[in-house]
Image: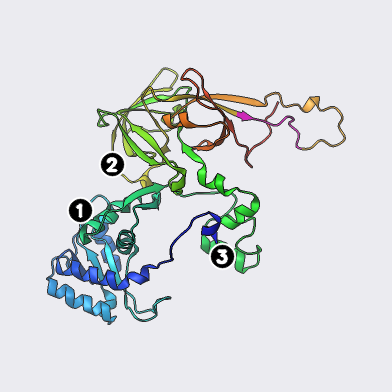
């Protein structure tokens, strides 16, 4: 129902369990090629060894021994349930997901679709790249929580010899004053706290549609980056690209229908002063849509404002370990000037009762304009377009791009956080 509401048409519904025979066959081929091993190391010890980059005692056992143990897993024997099939990648890799990950586990409990036919089941990380490829997926959308596992995804496709799939990351959607976990939402349904999954209070597709959201607004909004012009700071990446290059990514990482946008990557980039002040020397940060970097040097003026930053890229770093996830813009002449306009209420009192004179409660500051700069994609904005600016909120384009000397004017879309401005 949600798929139909979103206007998405599909040919058929498939399940990973449809491919269990193919996945088992592929796993056996990897065993025979010496690319995997069957490991009976206890769970806690295996976790410890992976954390310490210690090679398992089972890693170099013979193919025959691996096939023998694999058969124990297939049969679901007492020995089999103690084993798992692990890929032999690189136990010393800084990326933990590449340290000889698990491909198959033994579990005699019946499966909800195929019953007791199988005693072994593939892990998500092994099954997903295989199924995506053979089903003809060209571009897989994965939330950023899988960032560190993306190299593993590509490595699996390389190991088993299937067509590569392009990966696009998107940030997980968060909402205030609600929960997004299906398990937690189920509690509200089962306890009759709401009137079903389409209750207007629910953050589900049907719920928010009943609340008044237009599907086209959900699908076609544009995601762009912007930096406030006042006191913006230049970050020089010593090992950044000597020659700028451009990468094309989706405007919205979950809805491909929104189209693509181009991002320029340069040796020098702009970030906001507030973000620059929050950085400590030698701190690792995440540059959104690029990766991690380490800030080696911070220069400040006599007023303690940051004037320059110097750092290096750290592509092997994980966004999970960083405190700061920063928007940035390339240091190019393609940036466009912006005026961000926020509107306040006409009066500062929530509700007028019997008072006849509203002048004492007039809001003296109903309009606030902030200068900024945006990426070159914003040149294509049309009057009336709704867009989301990273870490800034939603805006409506009131005046589109005309010339580089005239700023694009964006009106802030009000939300539930809006409060009356004091006079």
Pick the front one: 227 or 337: 337
Bin the neighbour count of mark 1 within 10 Å (Cα to Cα): few under 14, some 14-19, many 20 and up. some
Looking at the rendering, the stretch of residues picked out in magenta corresponds to 342-350
Give residue 197's quadrant in the image: bottom right
What is the CA distance from the residue labelled 2 to the residue labelled 1?
A: 17 Å
Q: Main secondary structure of the magenta part?
A: loop
What is the CA distance from the residue labelled 2 to the residue labelled 3?
A: 39 Å
Above or below: residue 83 compared with residue 263: below
Q: What residue does disc 2 label?
A: 315
Pick the front one: 224 or 176: 224
Q: Is residue 270 left or right of residue 348?
A: left
Q: What residue does disc 3 label?
A: 186
Above or below: residue 56 compared with residue 237: below
Identity of the residue drawn at 39% across and 39% down: 288
Magenta stretch: includes residue 204: no
Q: Earlier in the sequence, mark 2 or mark 1?
A: 1
Instruction: Find numbered disc 3 in the image and state the secondary structure of the residue it sits on.
Output: helix
Q: Earlier in the sequence, mark 1 or mark 3?
A: 1
- Percent position (x, y) of residue 326? 42, 36
Task: Give the label on residue 92, or none.
Answer: 1
Pick the front one: 304 or 275: 275
Give residue 186's quadrant in the image: bottom right
Label 2 close to label 3 by CB (< 8 Å)? no
Quarter in which the N terminus is drawn:
bottom right
Bin the neighbour count of mark 3 within 10 Å (Cα to Cα): few under 14, some 14-19, many 20 and up. some
């Amino acid at each position: 129902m949600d798929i139909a509401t979103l206007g998405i048409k599909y040919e058929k519904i498939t399940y990973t369990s449809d491919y269990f025979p193919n996945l088992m066959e592929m796993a056996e081929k990897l065993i025979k090629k010496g690319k995997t091993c069957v490991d009976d190391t206890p769970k806690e010890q295996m976790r410890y060894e992976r954390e310490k980059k210690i090679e398992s005692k089972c890693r170099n056992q013979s193919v025959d021994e691996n096939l023998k143990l694999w058969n124990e897993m297939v049969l679901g024997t007492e020995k089999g349930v103690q084993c798992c099939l692990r890929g032999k990648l690189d136990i010393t890799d800084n990326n933990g997901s590449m340290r000889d990950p698990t491909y198959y586990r033994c579990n005699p409990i019946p499966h909800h679709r195929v019953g007791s036919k199988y005693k072994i089941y593939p892990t998500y990380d092994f099954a997903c790249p295989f199924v995506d490829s053979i089903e003809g997926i060209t571009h897989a959308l994965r939330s950023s929580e899988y960032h560190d596992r993306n190299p593993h995804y590509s490595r699996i496709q390389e190991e088993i010899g299937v067509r590569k799939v392009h990966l696009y990351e998107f940030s997980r959607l968060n909402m205030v004053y609600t929960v997004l976990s299906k398990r937690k939402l189920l509690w509200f349904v089962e306890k009759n706290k709401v009137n079903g999954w389409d209750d207007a209070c629910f953050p589900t597709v049907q719920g928010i549609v009943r609340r008044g959201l237009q599907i086209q607004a959900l699908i076609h909004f544009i995601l762009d980056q912007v930096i406030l012009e006042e006191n913006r700071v230049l970050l020089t990446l010593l090992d950044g690209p000597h020659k700028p290059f451009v990468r094309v990514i989706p405007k919205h990482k979950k809805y491909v229908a929104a189209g693509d946008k181009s991002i320029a990557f340069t040796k020098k980039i702009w970030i906001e002063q507030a973000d620059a002040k929050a950085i400590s020397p030698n701190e690792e940060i995440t540059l959104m849509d690029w990766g991690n970097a380490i800030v080696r040097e911070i220069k400040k003026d006599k007023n303690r404002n940051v004037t320059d930053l110097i750092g290096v890229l750290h592509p092997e770093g994980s966004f999970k370990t960083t405190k700061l996830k920063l928007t940035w813009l390339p240091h190019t002449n393609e940036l466009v000037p912006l005026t961000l306009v926020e509107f306040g209420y006409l009066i500062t009192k929530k509700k007028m009762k019997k008072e006849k004179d509203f002048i004492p409660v007039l809001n003296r500051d109903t309009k606030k304009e902030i200068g900024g700069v945006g990426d070159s994609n914003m040149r294509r904005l049309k009057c009336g377009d709704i867009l989301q600016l990273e870490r800034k909120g939603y805006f409506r384009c009131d005046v589109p791009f005309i010339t580089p000397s005239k700023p694009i004017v964006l009106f802030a879309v009000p939300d539930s956080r809006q409060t009356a401005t004091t006079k």
